[in-house]
Amino acid sequence: MRQIELPLGGMVFSGIASGPADGELVMLLHGFPQTARAWSAQVQQLGEAGWHAVAPDIRGFAPGARPELVADYAQDQVASDVLAIAAQLGADSFHLVGHDLGGIIAWDVACRHPARIRTLAVASTPHLAVFAAALHARQEQRLPPFDLFRQPGTAEHALLDGDAAALRAGYRGLDEHLIQEYVCHFSQPGALTAALNHFRAFDFADWLALPAATVPTLFTWGADDPYLARPTALATRGHVTARYTETELQGVAHWLPELAPETVTALLHAHLRS
């Protein structure tokens, strides 16, 4: 596995990669509050299997790609990053994988630009129309704290005060060394604000209007995920018109790539090969 830097539009996207540069591109998008490091196991194993596996640090998370304005984090801007990174890597079309915030981005890119996407795989994040409906109805107990994340200043203090106690608590189940790595990353000046700007730029009305996915899609989630209710997860099947595979992982919470690395990797292998 190797570290990468991708200059793009005056910014520099860091990340990790593995596998032959001429292999089929599999781009893996990380969640919040994480970095490309979240996909380490999958990037390594997919690369060893012959795929060109690339996990970039997305806009706001890469130290060299942190624009200041909330408007710079609108989903069309973030989607353009994903497509431009793929083009820079020589891929006219590619396989797209996302978890959490990366899943939000992946759904948006795949549903709006299906000609560029060969297959889609998303962990922990339902189709955005389903997601927005659940957030609006507030009938489910298992929802992420988007209202908090969208409050400038308040969210930063809530997550970082007391030696980042709330931030650390959110990583429950992860290795302590990895938690410390993430806390150090988001404690850097401006890092957490840049990451939170994604949530502050969300347009939920736009989510409700997102078309169905028309590419082969894998959706997987943890049965113990505190941010995703099972009815919401199951409703995703109504928003995919191509081959669709869904897998609920029992005894697993939110951080699927790290909590169930072998299972997630096996699911990705099967999905990509089919």
Image: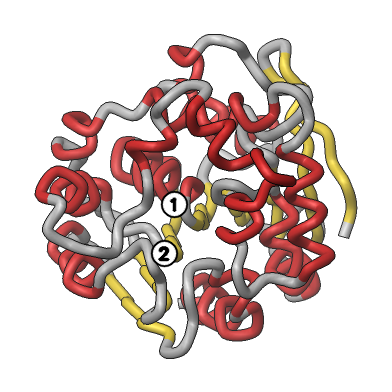
- For label 1, the crowd category at 10 Å Cα-Cα, with few meaning under 14, some 14 to 19 and many 20 or more, is many
Residue at 72% of width from left, 11% of height from top?
10
Is residue 160 left or right of 3 when viewed as pictured?
left
Nearer the N terminus, badge 1 or badge 2?
1
Quarter of the figure with the C terminus: bottom left
Compute the Cα span from label 1 to label 2. Answer: 7 Å
* Residue 228 figure quarter: bottom left
Q: Is residue 96 above or below residue 85?
A: below
Q: Camera-side residue: 98 or 182?
A: 182
Q: Which amino acid, mark 2?
A: Ser
Q: Which mark is residue 124?
A: 2
Q: Camera-side residue: 19 or 262?
A: 262
Residue reaching furthest front? 162
* Residue 140 figure quarter: bottom left
- Residue 246, position as x, y percentages in the image: 32, 77
Residue at 69% of width from left, 22% of height from top?
190
Is residue 228 left or right of 44 when viewed as pictured?
left
Residue labelled with disc 1: 103
